[in-house]
Structures are given as structure tokens and as C-alpha cells.
Amino acid sequence: MAFDHREGASGANPYAPLMGRTYVTTEEVGTLRVLDTQRIDVLDAWVRRLIPGTDIWPSAGETDAVAYIDAILVKAPTLRPVVLAGIDAAERAARSLHGKGFSACSPAEQTEILKTIEKTGAPEAFGVVFELTYEAYYRTPAVQDIVRERTGFDVTNTVVGKAMKPFPSDRLITIGERADRYRSVSA
């Protein structure tokens, strides 16, 4: 997971342990079940600001980042109120500051709103969305292909793991035969 500890950024994410235990397969990412249409638009604009993309790299909005975050919210319902509150805070801030929805704001206006959300508006939500966006981004096969092509590094191993040889349990026999290395003490 990505962690951002720039000046003004929130500290450690209290939801990181839950997020680290919540695994979503690529087959589970697809139909959105938690987010409604308005929140999908806001979250899509949000992830596009986090990873805007270039001529080589796709933006997070061009990946399945929103669907991935939704799938995480299905499997980890504890995160739902945090993320939904963050999305709603971004939408409220956009309407309050600019008189229009977050997704209708310019990229500069969206960045301004997200900086506010990160610092004071909903820092926990910002941290969760930030980390899940980067996690979703680097799970995307197209992004993995670019990383592999440009660096030679196979990101797939860090995302889905790698098969291991079975541990030779006969190596433990000598340990089991050794004398105990402690002595009894009466309390």
C-alpha cells in the first residue's frame, strides 16, 4: 500500500490493518454494489486527481480503481461509512466553494478541495481512498505491463504472490530430538 506522509498529510491510517486483511480478487471487481451514481462520479474524479496519467501511463480513472474500491467496501463494511463520508465531504465542499458538483469542477478546483479534505475535511477517508487507489492502480494488468516493460520488474509477484516449494518437514526432526533448553523454576 502507498503511504503519504508529506507535510500536512494525515499520519498512519487507522484502517490499514483492516485494509491489509481484505483481499479482493480480480474476478470480484466489476459490478458496483455500494456506490450510487453520484458517488461513483465523485470518486472517479477523485482517483483521476490522485493519478492523473500521462501519454504512457493511464490515469486511475482509466483503470478499475472505482470498482476495486467498491469491492473492498463490500468485503470490509467497516470502511463504508469512512469512504462514503469522504466522498460526501468532497461533494459538499465543491458545492460550497464553487457552486457545482465535485466532478464538474476543474482539475485545479478538485485538487484544492482534495487538499482540504486531506488536511481537515475527512483525513481518514482521504487516506483510505488514497491507498486503495494506488493498490487498484498497480493491480491493473495494463499498468503492470508498463512497469514490466520499463523496469523489468514483475509487479504480479507482489500482488498475487508466487508459488513456493513445500517446506521439507524432515528438517524439523533434529530440532524435535534436542534436549529442552530451559529449566523448571518453582513459583
Image (cartoon, helix red, strand yellow):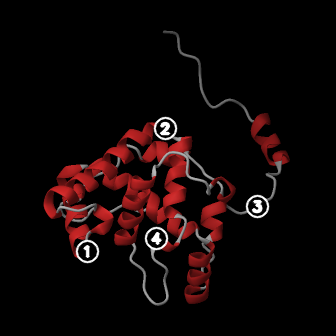
Q: Position of residue 137 (x, y in %)?
A: 51, 68
Of mark 3 and mark 4, the one earlier in the sequence is 4
> 80 or 173, which lies in front?
80
Q: Position of residue 59 (x, y in %)?
A: 45, 76
Q: Nearer the viewer, mark 3 or mark 1?
A: 1
The label number, if any, that marks residue 77 in the structure image: 2
Q: Nearer the viewer, mark 2 or mark 3?
A: 2
Q: Amino acid at mark 4?
A: Gly
Of mark 4 and mark 2, the one earlier in the sequence is 4
Q: Relative to residue 80, is residue 158 depicted above or below?
A: below
Furthest residue toward left: 97
Write down the quadrant of residue 5 in the picture.
bottom left
Q: What residue does disc 1 label?
A: 106
Q: Residue at x 49, y 38 (%)?
A: 77
Tell me: 164 left or right of 40.
right
Q: Relative to residue 84, is residue 38 depicted above or below?
A: below
Q: What residue does disc 3 label?
A: 163
Marks 3/1: CA–CA distance:
46 Å
Badge 3 element: loop
Of mark 2 and mark 3, the one earlier in the sequence is 2
Badge 2 element: helix
Of mark 1 and mark 2, the one earlier in the sequence is 2
Marks 2/3: CA–CA distance:
31 Å
Q: What residue does disc 4 label?
A: 61
Tell me: 107 left or right of 27.
left
Marks 3/4: CA–CA distance:
32 Å
Badge 1 element: loop
